[in-house]
Amino acid sequence: MARLKHKLSEPPVPPERGVKAATFKLLLDTAMDIIRQSGHIPSVAEAAARSKVSRATAYRYFPSRSALVTAVIDSSLGPVRKLASDNPSGRERVHELFLQTFPRFKEFEAQLRAAAQLSLEQWGLERAGLLEEEPYRRGHRVRILEHAIEPLVPQLRPDVRKRLHHALSVVYGIEPYVILKDIWGLRDREVERTALWMADALIDAALRESEQKPAPRGRPKPNGARVPAAAAAKRR
């Protein structure tokens, strides 16, 4: 199983019923509306004011912007994260995943952009030692993609499989929308087609590379033998 650099942010557990459940849902729906309408990430206090809920109550459910955004994304992408396929073809699993989830990325594009924005903002604050809340950690795509490419594992060398997993994580998510829409001006449907085309190209490249023998390490001697990589590094 793939290992991540950080533990993923987990959404707050919503109350099951009653006034507390209704208040939680009101705050969450309000935050999603603010993001959808204005594109910015509301503070917990702003969501509370817009919902006509006291700040103290709001902070009991969502102690930080990270907790609030984690709940927003979980509500938006919850069904995506539960997708599973028994298709024996890895390529077809990847196709199924992209075709089923990219329309949802489109539907919740504003919320996903806001989550990416928060992650980038907190990265800078954390590096500067100014971050005052727990950071929002993304990465659910790692497990989702690991399941999608599982049938390809017998056909791929371990190092190539790992590289394919890394590469697919770049083209699966909100990032293709940010690049292809903001820079190239592509329509949503063309973004989906381009992302799927890239995924196919990556799978093809991984399969071709796995059919080849790994290149020997080090550099060749004049007589054709090879100098071990460690010895070659010492001679430089």
Image: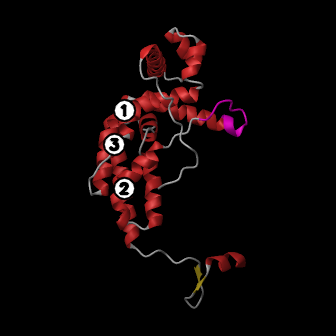
The magenta region covers 125-135
Q: Main secondary structure of the magenta part?
A: loop
Q: SS of the residue at dot 2?
A: loop
Which residue is more in the foreground, 97 or 179?
A: 97
Residue 83: which numbered mark, if any?
Answer: 3
Which residue is more in the foreground, 9 or 121?
A: 9
Say few, some or many: other residues with alpha carbon within 10 Å of mark 2 (under 14 / 14 to 19 / 20 or more): many
Residue at x 36%, y 66% (from the top left corner): 154
Q: Name the image quarter holding residue 180.
A: top left
Does 179 appear in magenta?
no
The type of residue carrying mark 3 is Leu
Residue 163: which numbered mark, if any?
Answer: none
Q: Which residue is mark 1?
A: 106
Q: SS of the residue at dot 1?
A: helix
**Extreme residue toward the bottom, this view:** 223
The type of residue carrying mark 2 is Ile
The type of residue carrying mark 1 is Lys
